[in-house]
Every structure is written in structure tokens, then in C-alpha cells.
Image (cartoon, rainbow, N blue to C red):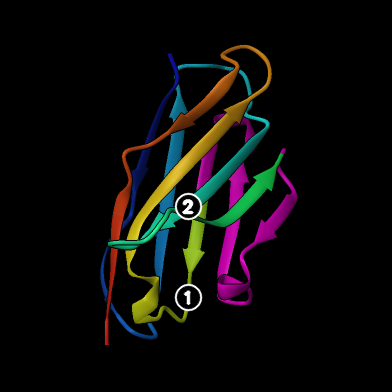
Amino acid sequence: QVQVVESGGGLVQAGGSLRLSCSASGTLIGAKTMAWYRQAPGKQRELVASILNDDITDYADFVKGRFTISRLYAKNTLYLQMNSLKPEDTGAYYCKARFIVGPSGTYWGQGTQVTVSS
């Protein structure tokens, strides 16, 4: 059974930085895609950034130029470097891992809270 665990959230002032980490364990198979989503109170969950295999990345417009997604493919470990944080970046950040072989399916973590103070 694949388990997805996020870490690295916290409280930071506007303009600061945080680095989130995610590990998808329980399999030696590499996830096809991994992604970060976020959900602010009272809002729907939205895609922040994704990575296909280990090098094809995509970003939401609201984080382009500020956030960087990266991955250690062999270890199913995902990172999100967040710079120039804004109060509107506040929310719970979730990691998603999608497998197309082995433990096929989509797996979510429990989330890590990011709070940006103004």
C-alpha cells in the first residue's frame, strides 16, 4: 500500500521562503506523475505544480517565477521550493502521486499547513 506523507509547512512572513517535501513510500515503482495542490479555507483544492516522470514540469500561473517543483524519481520524493510567499499562498498543501503500473492509482497525503503572515 502506498503511503504519501508531506512535511515542511509552517508559519512564515510575507516575502519569505519554505520548502515542502513529500515521500510516497511502500513501493519500488516510480510514480508517473507527482503534484502539489493547495486548499485555502472555504475554497476548492487547486493545482499548484506538477512533474511528469522526473523533468516535465507545469505550474499554475499564480506561482510561476516563485515556486519550483523538483523530484528524486528513484525515491518517489517530491519537493516544492516556495519563494516570495504571499498571504494568499496560505492553505493546506497536499501531495499527490499517480501510478500507472504496480500500485496503479492515485494517492494523496494528509497535507501540511502553510501560513503566510502579512
Quadrant containing the N terminus is top left
Instruction: Tell me, for residue 37, which label it has, or none.
Output: 2
Relative to residue 1, is residue 51 drawn left or right?
A: right
31 vs 69: above or below: above
Q: Nearer the viewer, residue 110 or 68?
A: 110
Mark closest to the chain's N terminus, 2 or 1: 2
SS for callout 1: loop
Relative to residue 77, is residue 13 drawn left or right?
A: left
Measure the C-alpha gap from mark 2 to mark 1.
16 Å
* Residue appearing at x 36%, y 61% in the figure: 43
Answer few, some or many: residues within 10 Å of disc 2's Cα (few below 14, many 20 plus, some between 14 and 19): some
Instruction: Tell me, for residue 51, which label it has, or none.
Output: none
User: Residue 9: x, y in percent?
Assistant: 30, 58
* Residue appearing at x 36%, y 43% in the figure: 6
Which residue is identified by label 1?
83
The reply to whether discs 2 and 1 touch (Cβ–Cβ < 8 Å) is no
User: Residue 97: x, y in percent?
Assistant: 54, 34
85 vs 18: above or below: below
SS for callout 2: strand
Q: Nearer the viewer, residue 61 or 20?
A: 61
71 vs 69: above or below: above
Q: Is 75 one of the magenta-colored residues? A: yes
* Residue appearing at x 60%, y 16% in the figure: 104
User: Residue 106: x, y in percent?
Assistant: 53, 27
Relative to residue 81, is residue 41 drawn left or right?
A: left
Answer few, some or many: residues within 10 Å of disc 1's Cα (few below 14, many 20 plus, some between 14 and 19): some
The residues colored magenta run: 53-78
User: Residue 33: x, y in percent?
Assistant: 65, 37
Quadrant containing the C terminus is bottom left
Please state which amino acid type lies under the numbered disc 1: Asn
Please state which amino acid type lies under the numbered disc 2: Tyr
* Residue appearing at x 47%, y 75% in the figure: 83
